Image (tube, rainbow, N blue to C red):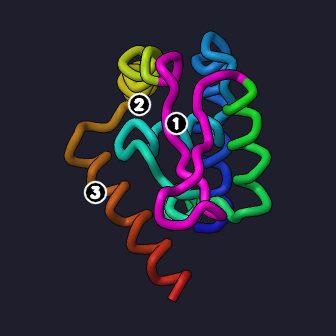
Amino acid sequence: MCFALYSASNALVRAYRPLLEAYELTFPQYLVMQTLWRQNGCSQTQLSAATKLDMGTLTPIVKRLEVKGLITRLACVEDERKKLITLTTQGEAIKHEALALKQTLLNKVQMDAEALDLLRRQCLALIEDLQS
């Protein structure tokens, strides 16, 4: 089981790599952008929880996305020590095309929607079991 999950994860990231090159994004950067496209204006702690990336991994990703002009970090009104991470106009502009990459990738998979949904739910259950 472990090898199969590990290999599937690597295959997924490798399959995304050429698709993400057009946007100059890595897969972890894409995960952060997906989170912000769903819920703009997250704290770094919220992003960490949503992406399952630890802060040591997430911080450089956020900084690189900011340098690329896709996001900005603004001081939180309630606590200026905290930063809210928000999409820039440029980050918002690539949303629809970049999210469509998921369907491009799914078109390569020989599983129907029901099987894919079951696989997703089983993976999430496994994550939940292992993190508790």
* 21 sits to left or right of 116: right
Measure how far apart labels 3 and 1 are at the Cα level.
25 Å
- N-term mark: 1 or 2: 1
From this viewpoint, which residue is outermost toward the bottom?
132
Relative height, residue 121 to residue 102 (above, below): below
Relative height, residue 105 to residue 119 (above, below): above
Measure how far apart labels 3 and 2 are at the Cα level.
14 Å
Residue at image coords 49%, 72%: 127
Relative height, residue 59 to residue 131 (above, below): above
Identify the image quadrant of residue 10.
Answer: top right
Amino acid carrying label 3: it is Leu
Given residues 38 and 87, the one toward you in this image is 87
- N-term mark: 3 or 2: 2
Q: Which residue is mark 3?
A: 118
Residue at image coords 52%, 36%: 33
The answer to whether residue 79 is magenta is yes
Which stretch did the figure color magenta? 68-91
Q: Which residue is mark 2?
A: 109
Residue 95 spot, x, y in % from top left: 41, 22
Q: Using a 10 Å C-alpha cutoff, classify the residue at mark 2 as few (fewer than 14 neighbours), some (14 to 19) or many (20 or more).
A: few
Residue 53 spot, x, y in % from top left: 64, 59
Q: Which residue is mark 1?
A: 33
* 16 sits to left or right of 115: right
Amino acid carrying label 1: it is Met
For marks 3 and 1, give the one nearer the viewer.
1
Given residues 15 and 100, the one toward you in this image is 100
